[in-house]
Amino acid sequence: MKTPAFFRILIASGAIAAYAAAEGAADAAAPETVALPQPSRDSVTLGAALEKRATNREFSADELTAQELSDLLWAANGFNRPDIKKRTAPTAVNRQEIDLYVLRRDGAWLWDADGNRLVRTSGEDLRGLTGRSGAGAANFALEAPVALLYVVDYERQKMQSRPQDAFKYACVDCGFIGQNVYLHCAAAGLNTVFLGSLKPEQISKALGLPETSVPLFAQTVGRAPRQ
Ligand SMILES: Cc1cc2nc3c(=O)[nH]c(=O)nc-3n(C[C@H](O)[C@H](O)[C@H](O)COP(=O)(O)O)c2cc1C
């Protein structure tokens, strides 16, 4: 697959640039952004979080607060060593090729980890494109306020020497982020489920992703239903 040189330069400067290219130059000048508060740290022990780590598929419709979202995203894949630009989740050859999108009722947002802010990439509610769908299947992804979306940017991953490893490494790298989210949710009292079920083509289209960026997994997050 050949990507035009113009687009390659945009992609190399990050997913926000790719988004801007997809949306058009006028929107690129002023994408809608939401600043998140400084992330706080979990205070429970790792052992306690491991004891509680579990998949839960029942959610309340309550929105997460900005602080809860910031804490969640930092735990997922934030910079824990900002001086050397390294993160809470490892990546093969330190490519840091997984972008996190936050799908909510109010649209889809790309998380800019550097600036700890959300950049709107769609005004549509795309949560229903993650999780189970079909006759008789209630989709818990529509109950929960947040679906995290894990998108690999193969252009940034650049596995030219071993292209056969690109998909394998991308999946593993998503898995580390997913486990960070599981442990953070256990520590923060949130429910979560990691999802292989999603509609990647429809999501790509809605987000205007280039061919070199592919949604691989999603992870629903929210509070437990009220008793
Ligand atoms: C790669 C992967 C894909 C998964 N995909 C789905 C999914 O599409 N839908 C779902 O309800 N659960 C999904 N799960 C959650 C598993 O069903 C769950 O982790 C498993 O039942 C074990 O439960 P536990 O996480 O509570 O230990 C997935 C988990 C993994 C690791």
Image: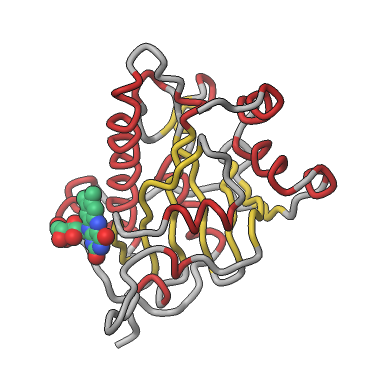
Q: How is the image coloured?
A: secondary structure
Q: Which residue is at the front of the view, 134 or 150?
A: 134
Q: Quadrant of ligand 1?
A: bottom left
Q: Is residue 52 visible?
A: no
On screen, residue 3 versus residue 78, left or right, reads: right
Question: Image check: 173 left or right of 115?
Answer: left
User: Residue 79's x, y, as percent?
Assistant: 49, 33
Q: Residue 157: image x %, image y %?
A: 45, 25
Question: Residue 187 versus residue 169: which sits nearer the camera?
Answer: 169
Decide if residue 79 is on the left or right side of residue 122.
left
Q: Nearer the viewer, residue 2 or 62?
A: 2
Question: Does residue 51 appear to the left or right of 166 in the view shown?
Answer: left
- The tally of labels here is 0
Decide which of 119, 197 is in the foreground and name it.
Answer: 197
Res 60 → quadrant: bottom left
Is residue 120 in view from this perspective?
A: yes
Q: Residue furthest bottom?
A: 227
Horizontal and vertical percent position of residue 110: 58, 49
Which residue is found at the position 39% from the left and 68% from the top? 222
Quarter holding residue 227: bottom left
Residue 189, quarter of picture: bottom left
Which residue shows up at 34% across the image and 51% down it? 181
Q: Residue at x 35, y 20 (%)?
A: 163
Residue 29: percent from left, percent from top: 83, 44
Going by the picture, which residue comes out furthest to the left? 51
- Seen from this angle, which residue lies furthest front? 1
